[in-house]
Amino acid sequence: MARVEQGMVSVAAPAPAKRAAPQVPQFVRSLGWGLVSWAPVIVLLIVWEAVARSGLVTPFSLPSLSRIFMRMGSDLMSGDLPIAVGLTLWRALAGFIASAVVGIAIGLAMARSRFFMWFFDPIVSVGFPVPKIAFLPIFAMWFGFFDTSKIVMIAFNTIFPIITATAVGVAGVEKEIIWSARNLGTREREMLWEILLPAALPQIFTGLQVALPIALIVGILTEMAMGGYGIGGSMQTASRMADSLGVFAGIVEIAIVGYALVKLMAVLRRRLLMWHQEAQEPTTV
Amino acid sequence: MSAALSRAMPAVASALFRYLPLVILLALWQAANTFHLVSTAVLPPLSAVLEQGCELVTSFDFWDHTASSLYRGGLGLLIAIVVGGALGIAMAWWRPIRYVSSPLVEIFYPLPKSALIPITALWLGFGDSSKVLLIFLGCMLPVTIGAFNGARGAEQTLIWSARSLGASRWRTLLDVVFPSALPELLNGIRTALALSFILLVSAEMIVARKGLGYLIGFLGDGGNYEGMFAVVLAIAVLGLLADRAYLAVSRRVLRWRE
């Protein structure tokens, strides 16, 4: 608690820390600050380990972290872990990229043409809130139980936020920019790549950032429901075998993968939109 | 009467025009079967699906499954909204809570929530309680983040004015911070609503003996594909109606803003 309070003071006003120890190098201070701000997570992990070892709960309902990591280590050595993570990632990213390409194209068409707007608007506005995961057995019937049906299911779920974000973003591009570009003799194709897409990129990227976690959620679900290799599949198998260590190892793995992907998208966003004014603003959670 | 009717006609016509693409899709579905472009084993005709749907709607079984799904989803979502909303506002209002919970939120938010299905099943079995827990855990964070962002965006001058007019901290929280957090909070709840349907249906497909998700698998395994399609469509309509009803309610709640 004391550590957290200390962190509070230093975030509210970094000055006192400086006054206390003016010669502490910058990187040590940022390291210390990092430790303080992550203290709740570290405490949570310690509590997890302590509760699991104390005998308050059975090792079946909550295995200790150290045993989970040991299990992950042995899975890593045997090659099961890289295969599972790789397959889950491959399907999620394949579905995500397919839906990004098609979704951005549809969104662009909707923003630029009244016919496409008329045709896709009701489909998207009805399709977006529908729980599309219910179509899984139908997709399994059509595309089989292997990668195709899973990837199609992922794309089907992730495409809606991408379409909406692109359509709204492109429609919101300032008319002045478009007019000046046209005045300067920009052709349609150049307009698309040089003006519309870059100007709408912040919104499009937000749509992609919404879609990527959905890709992982749905990817895991398809594996659990239809079987096959992958993190979700191995969790489901472990669950059937009452192998709780396997289930918890799966959740730690997928948590790490999900966290890494979300962070990667944030970094990518900062890189791609470095020219945009939003890059100057402080980032929030 | 006829005046009202003639006033309603343009609205009906424009709605019809707006939703015409959906009608076209459904017509294509029926036509694909009528002209034998696809086998009925791959895509049962729309008419047969609707027929099965009517039969289903009049059966007790269907409503039994629906009630069980709605109970699980509703209860889980309710707990998620109450706990998640309170946590989000508390995070914006009291610094110590923010410092303790924001790294935890940051860690758990990107966790693909579907990974919790086997864990809740491991803890609580195949019944209602494991789904309620799953939906609570899965839907809480979007609500928390909405409430947090909304409450943090409350105008400082309003808070100061309220405080200087003698409102207690609690009163300020209730009368100033909560209303200004409401729009984003309601947005977060909408995300949670959509997520609750996904988690509910998939958890029922994977580990359940009751509920609409289970019914899909049950009918599909039994070879009743028309019935399976009908239940899938019923879930789609249910999700759509829930979202539309929620939007209407939240618009009404936010009417004071205009």
Image (spheres, coloured by chain):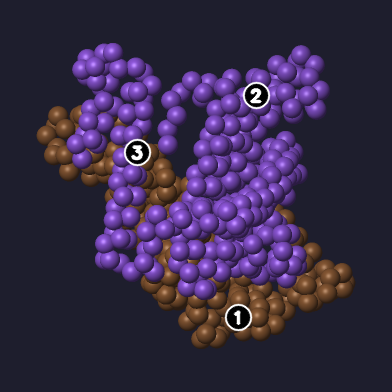
Q: Which residue has dot 1 on it?
A: B218
Vertical side of B234 occupied by A163: above or below? above
Identify the amino acid type marked 2. Lys
Identify the amino acid type marked 3. Trp
Left or right: residue B184 versus residue B158 is: right
Q: Which residue has dot 3 on it?
A: A38
Q: Which residue has dot 2 on it?
A: A175
Contact flag, marks 1 and 3 (Cβ < 8 Å):
no
Q: Secondary structure at mark 3?
A: loop
x and y, in percent, of residue B136 in the image: 39, 60
Question: What residue lies at 48% left-to-right and 20% top-to-bottom?
Answer: A280
Chain seen in brown: B
- Measured Cα–Cα span from mark 2 to mark 1: 54 Å
- Label 1 crowd (10 A; few <14 / some 14-19 / many >=20): some
Q: Chain of mark 1?
A: B
Question: What residue lies at 64% left-to-right and 26% top-to-bottom?
Answer: A199
x and y, in percent, of residue A43 in the image: 30, 46
Instruction: Name the disc covering residue A6, or none.
Output: none
Identify the amino acid type marked 1. Phe
The residue closer to the viewer here, A112 or B41, is B41
- Measured Cα–Cα span from mark 2 to mark 3: 45 Å
